[in-house]
Image (cartoon, grey):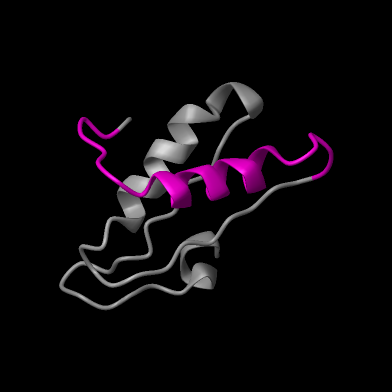
């Protein structure tokens, strides 16, 4: 789902898209980190939406937030 409003972060979005698209060879992964409410989730979702045609075999978005606060480890999620 593409964020309804996405304001700012143009430079960051460009960098993420450049990294994801690369030269078209190999696998791609991007890790975004930031304080709660900083917009990293919106940035990830927007980038995924914009490059969906580049990854026709699928995309994976993992929300590491734990209900009630804290964070899950990638191992817990992918387990």
Q: Classify residue 72 as left or right of residue 15.
A: left
Q: Position of residue 3 (x, y in %)?
A: 27, 35
In front of the other: 71 or 8? 8
Q: How many numbered badges does the structure rendering display?
A: 0
Q: Which quadrant of the structure image shows residue 45? A: top left
Q: Where does residue 20 sit, x and y in percent of width and height? A: 64, 43
Q: Is residue 5 visible?
A: yes
Q: Is 70 above or below relative to 46?
A: below
Q: Is residue 22 left or right of residue 62?
A: right
Q: Does 57 sit left or right of 12 as displayed?
A: right
State yes or no: residue 16 in magenta: yes
Q: Say which residue appears at 30% left-offset and 66% top-offset.
A: 65
Query: Which residue is at 28% across, 72% downward?
Result: 35
What quarter of the picture does the N terminus occupy? top left
Is 11 within the magenta?
yes
Q: Position of residue 60 (x, y in %)?
A: 53, 44
Q: Which residue is drawn at the image coordinates 84% and 38% (left, top)?
A: 25
Identify the residue at the far left of this view.
68
Name of the residue lying farthest toward the bottom: 70
Looking at the image, the residue that sits furthest to the right is 25
The image quadrant of residue 40 is bottom left
Q: Residue at x 58, y 55 (%)?
A: 30
Viewer can see residue 56: no
Q: Which residues are magenta?
A: 3-26
Task: Name the side, left or right, on which 69 lies relative to 25.
Answer: left
How far from the left and from the top, in percent, is residue 33?
42, 68
Q: Classify the position of the C terminus by image quarter.
A: bottom right
């Amino acid at each position: 789902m593409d964020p309804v409003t996405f304001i700012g972060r143009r430079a960051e979005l460009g960098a993420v898209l450049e990294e994801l698209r690369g030269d078209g060879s190999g696998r791609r992964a991007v890790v975004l980190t930031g304080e709660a409410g900083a917009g990293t989730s919106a940035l990830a979702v927007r980038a995924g939406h914009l490059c969906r045609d580049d990854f026709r075999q699928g995309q994976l978005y993992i929300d590491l937030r734990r209900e009630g606060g804290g964070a899950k480890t990638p191992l817990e999620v992918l387990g």
